[in-house]
Image (cartoon, rainbow, N blue to C red):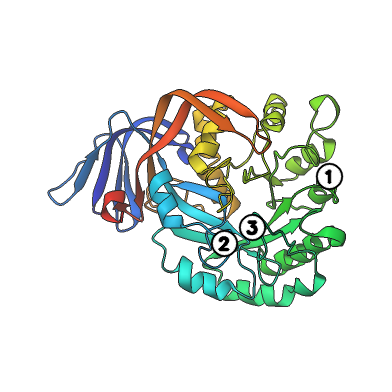
Amino acid sequence: MKHKLILKGGYVIDPSQAHEGVADVAFGDGRVSGFGENIAADRSTRVIELNGSIVTPGLIDLHTHVYWGGTSLGVDADALGRRTGVTTFVDTGSAGPGNFSGFRKHVIEKSRSRILAFLHISFAGIFGFSERLSVGESEDSRLLSPVDAVEVIEANKDCIIGIKVRVGKHTSGTLGLIPLEIALQVAEQTGLPVMVHIDEPPPTYEAVVSLLRHGDILTHAFRPFPNSPLGAQGKIKSAIVDARERGVLFDIGHGKGSFSFQTARAMLANGFPPDTISSDVHKYCIAGPAFDQLITMSKFLVLGMKLGDVIAASTANPAMAIRRPELGSLKVGSTADATILALKKGDFQYQDAKGETLIGDVQLACEGLVLNGAWSESWQG
């Protein structure tokens, strides 16, 4: 395969290959075409010297809301991707069976960033969420349409990678676990995973995870009390440990109200890191406290996670969670995505969803990205 672009001399962190060290990465025809030392270029190859920069597989944000213009939550994936180095945005339930075609036509197909989606089990997706309004889309059983969901999934399996459902006091109300039970039926019928949101009880954290299967994803996993994963003396509840042992995945989904430093410290101290780190970026948290994927990742560096583990939770791990192993990797033959990062040193303030401030001395910043083989300068606008 001919090399059209070579990133040369960067410090490459690629958890999919257990690689950390200086290497060249080459791209051609939409794929990684070379990986290793001193990759040779010809006259037509563009070479970018990256001495001192960190090169990772293209970042994947597993929990976002990017149905811009179609929901009150939506943000612009392309603008955010250029700034943060995220090459794959996974939209989690902004659209349901009743409005997914608009999301696909007007956003997914027109975006330069890659957008994949969890289809909401609720017919209209997340339709009533703003700073002044909150209507739980899972509260009304009339909106839960498993037959329509299956039909839409089967017609869009190139970009729908799972089913989203929100349960809790503010989202499913008196229906409790019923929306999750229906979403699991759709998941069984289509062979896809479920991502489930929890907020305040009922139902309890334990009741939710007890229903989840191998490969299903619990987002907002490090949320604050009430419905924290922690019990007395900061110990992890046994139902959460049991769920991980059977293959349930635990995702951060920071958002506006769903991440707590207190919970995160205890979970990490108990040897329970997140499987995936995601921002839950949307209109009402993009200016804080979540901001974006890089700020969310930086918080975990300050909390003590190793850089390689943070990169894994934002590349290889989410790629496996969405069953797209061609993403989140710089192996030869993988999709031609990469993110170029700097690890800035200084004094940085971070906030969680409860308003606690954490002072840190590091922050990740984006220096460039490759998307489908194209260097960021070639598509920035």
Q: Which residue is mark 3?
A: 130
Q: Is residue 181 placed above or below 257 in the rendered structure? A: below
Position of the N terminus, as image quadrant, is bottom left
- Residue type (three-letter) at the residue carrying disc 1: Glu
| Residue 219 badge | none
Comparing 178 with 245, the one in front is 178
- Residue type (three-letter) at the residue carrying disc 2: Ala
Q: What's the residue at 48%, 74% (across, down)?
A: 105
Q: Which residue is mark 2?
A: 117
Q: Earlier in the sequence, mark 2 or mark 1?
A: 2
Q: CA distance from mark 2 to mark 1?
A: 26 Å
Q: Earlier in the sequence, mark 1 or mark 3?
A: 3
Q: Position of residue 96 (x, y in %)?
A: 64, 69
* Residue 330 visible, this angle: no
Q: Nearer the viewer, mark 1 or mark 3?
A: 3
The answer to whether 148 appears left or right of 295 in the picture is right
